[in-house]
Image (tube, helix red, strand yellow):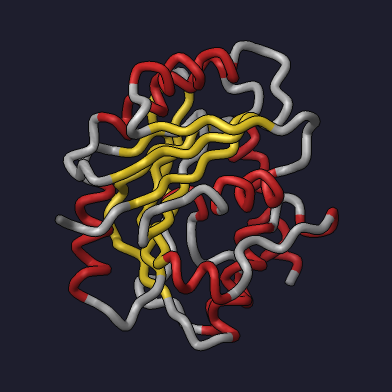
Amino acid sequence: MKGKISIIMGIYNCAPYLKESIDSIINQTYSNWELIMCDDGSKDDTLKIALSYQEKYPDKIIVLKNKVNKGLNYTLNKCLKKAKGEFIARQDGDDISLPERFEKEMAFLEEHKDYALVSTSMISFDENGNFGTIRHPEKVEKDDFRFGSPFSHATIIIRKEAMEDVGGYSVADHLLRVEDYHLWFKLYAKGYKGYNIQEALYKMRDDRNARLRRNFKNRLNETRL
């Protein structure tokens, strides 16, 4: 049997989108996986929806709960402690994995034992449809870290042994929202390396107007430099 993937997902107030996200995992062409969700103190029906899927798929889905909101770093580490797979994947509760995502990422890792991490390009979308694609360098070198995170966090699959070797995610207030960037630094500092498949296999729900404002601000800063 092909290697088992443990998908770790921190969920927080994502009830309107969670079913579509979970269904995109259930409908993967790669079938050897488990989904571990941890609710981080949601105030809507997020936990109720997650539990309904656990009841329907008790051999595939595990649901955990934080008593209070603890942040993504802590929440993902809590999921990691329950992971039984040899590979760790990420997904966010309002995003979508395209059907062949896991199959193509696992094929890469099986063929390239020298890589600890694989990621993919990512489509940005909202209620009006797709509006952009995020890409990163194919073969990530240390110099690529100077320009920001060289991987899209939610699209990754990483060998569990590498994740355990660096102690998972670092939990600290100043690392909230950059927990992935810090993880890549820890991995590369230990000699691990990652690769970006140049195909969009994941869809990230995003704010189109906020993206336009960020892009304008970035271009303005580049002009000033």
Camera-side residue of 64 and 120: 64
Q: How many marks?
A: 0
With 103 as the anchor, is 176 left or right in this view? right
- 110 or 225, which lies in front? 110
Task: Judge left or right: residue 35 versus residue 221.
Answer: left
Vertical comparison of 49 with 103: above or below? above
Q: Position of residue 28 (x, y in %)?
A: 23, 37
- Compared with 24, 103 (above or below) is below
Residue at position x 77%, y 40% from top? 70
Residue lying at 40% horizontally and 68% vertically, measured from the top left: 117
Q: Which residue occupies 56% across, 16% down?
A: 15
- Kindly give the residue lying farthest to the right in the view shown: 173
Q: Give the x, y percent position of residue 128.
A: 43, 19
Q: Is residue 193 left or right of residue 174?
A: left
Q: Nearer the viewer, residue 85 or 124?
A: 85
What quarter of the picture does the C terminus occupy?
A: bottom right
Q: Quadrant of residue 164?
A: bottom right
Quarter of the image holding residue 211? top right
Residue 221 in percent (x, y) is at 73, 61
x, y (%) of residue 1?
A: 15, 55
Q: Closer to the camera, 19 or 166?
A: 166
Residue drawn where x is 36% and y is 61% of the image: 86
Asked if 175 appears above or below 61 in the picture, the reply is below
